[in-house]
Image (spheres, helix red, strand yellow):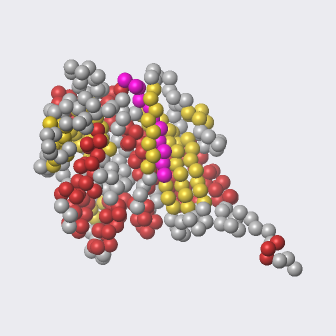
Amino acid sequence: MTSPSSTPLSYKDAGVDIDAGDALVDRIKPLAKKTMREGVLAGIGGFGALFEVPKRYKEPVLVSGTDGVGTKLKLAFEWQMHDTVGIDLVAMSVNDVLVQGAEPLFFLDYFACGKLDVDTAARVVGGIARGCELSGCALIGGETAEMPGMYPAGEYDLAGFAVGAVEKSKILTGQNVKPGDVVLGLASHGVHSNGFSLVRKVIERAGAELPATLDGQPFREAVMAPTRLYVKPVLAALAKHPHSKDAASPGGIKALAHITGGGLLENIPRVLPEGTAAHLKKGSWPQTELFAWLQKVAGIDDIEMNRTFNNGIGMVVVIDAAEAAACAATLRAEGETVYEIGAIAERGTGAAVVVG
């Protein structure tokens, strides 16, 4: 009789299914293939992905970013909505890279779970591939980690890593932002991927009294709408309205701010030089039904709304006043909803962002 201690144990017995991992890779490869672009030398399947910086760059500077999706995933698990969180993952990193004026080049993802469900993972990675395709960057690698006992059944975690490039002479630093410059706001798709710990509390407080629709979408779709990808429209605007380094006449787009955790109040100051402030005009952009509902049920004031959520503005563009109207027209032609939401002023002893 074979003793328990001498019974062979496989990796599968320990909770890791290598065959499932292989099946997922086979599902991923055609999705990743759709994202291929100039510069890719070797993508998914190798130990490392190879990418050559396009030769059109004369003095390329690489810009990197990493992020996750946060507690929005808890709703994805509960509502079984896995198709768009991959778009969120890509957007959170590529929009950050874009703020430096960089073109996203390639993306890598990390998917971790306790037990791999190939169908769920393929839905998530399908969203990642779609996000890469929409932002013009290649999905060239990643990692799927099956770790028994680390995550509850049906749950997973995501992380993403983006690398972009910008000409050294075209890096956006915000240092030439000056009083009189105009602040343009690009509309968000909704909550995007920040503030979901509060969103979940609001849903819990509302209980059964949830609205059927918000902003013309079923409630759950409105809440889970993926983070907007601003890459292609903003790159088009940067090409038409480039920042001039001429200290005597610094025109064009001078700064960009991705409105993530910390909202408008904490993200805009990150790209402003010392001694300046952004004065935003209350009511210059509409509050959506989604944000109005969140504010009402949470019972929070306007300051907290603008510090916790994007509150309807997902990307901010600071531009010379003489080019503001033309830049807004360029962005609208590229499909963005654009509002002139304020202007830059001397800061004095006040806050870095004033909404009033």
Q: Is residue 115 above or below residue 353?
A: below
Residue drawn where x is 76% and y is 67% of the image: 9
Tell how many labels: 0
Please give the name of the residue rendered at 53% of the width and 51% of the height, measured from the top-left corner.
Answer: 110
Determine whether, in the image, residue 230 is placed left or right of residue 77: left
For this view, does 109 lie left or right of residue 98? right
Residue sticking out furthest to the left: 356
Is 163 left or right of 296, judged from the image as shown?
Answer: right
What segment carries the magenta color?
Answer: 159-169
Does the image show residue 342?
no
Residue 303 lies, in percent from the top left, at 19, 56
The magenta stretch spans residue 165 = yes
Residue sitting at the far right: 1
Q: 228 or 341, which is in the foreground?
A: 341
Majority secondary structure in the magenta region: strand
Q: Residue 193 sits in which quadrant? A: bottom left
Residue 313: image location, x then y, percent: 26, 48
Residue 314 percent location from the top left of the image = 29, 47
The residue positioned 19% from the left and 40% from the top of the image is: 277
User: Which of 144/224 is in front?
Assistant: 144
Q: Nearer the viewer, residue 36 or 110?
A: 110
Picture quarter with the N terminus? bottom right
Q: Position of residue 240 (x, y in %)?
A: 30, 27
Name the residue at 44% across, 35% down. 63
Q: Quadrant of residue 320?
A: top left
User: Relative to 201, is 23 above or below?
Assistant: above
- Residue 285 appears anywhere in the view: yes
